[in-house]
Amino acid sequence: MKQFDHVVQSPEGIHARPAMQLAGFAKSLSGKVTVSCGGRTVSAKNLMQLLTLHAGRGAEVTFTVEGPEEIKETERLREFCRKNV
């Protein structure tokens, strides 16, 4: 299991387009991907669950990746978040 923290930079937070992009990217990963914010943990592959986090700009979220390729996939996800979330 690998984790990293990320501060949401998107003006909309993890809502609408950024949430859709994040879910789509997470689905391309083979491992289990979760995101936590404000005491809630949801699947990063589920758009509706992501929206329930209400993670606005400046919110600190924690991503967790579990699976056989977790090191490689964590780095790919971290880079995606830097550019898009």
Image: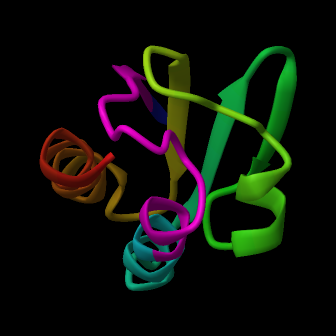
Judged left or right of residue 74, residue 76 is: left
| Residue 37 vs residue 27, the one in the foreground | 37
In-front residue for pair 76/2? 76
- Confirm whether the magenta stretch covers residue 54: no
Total residue callouts? 0
Residue 10 within the magenta-colored segment of the rendering: yes
Q: What's the residue at 69%, 30% (across, down)?
A: 36
Snapshot quadrant of residue 50: bottom right
Q: Position of residue 20 (x, y in %)?
A: 52, 75
Relative horizontal placement of residue 74, taking residue 13 as reference (left or right): left
72 relative to 53 in the view: left or right: left
Q: Quadrant of residue 61?
A: top right
Figure check: 56 above or below 51: above
Q: Quadrant of residue 37?
A: top right
Please provide percent x and percent y for residue 3: 45, 27
Q: Is 13 or 61 nearer to us in this picture?
A: 13
The answer to whether 49 is drawn above or below residue 54 in the figure is below
Which range of residues does the magenta coloring cover?
A: 3-20
Image x and y of residue 58, in percent: 44, 15
Residue name at image x 43 percent, y 61 percent: 18
**Residue shown at 63%/72% (left/top)?**
45
Q: Residue at x 30, y 30 (%)?
A: 9
Which coloring applies here? rainbow
- Direction from residue 76 to residue 1 in the image, left or right: right
| 47 vs 67: above or below | below
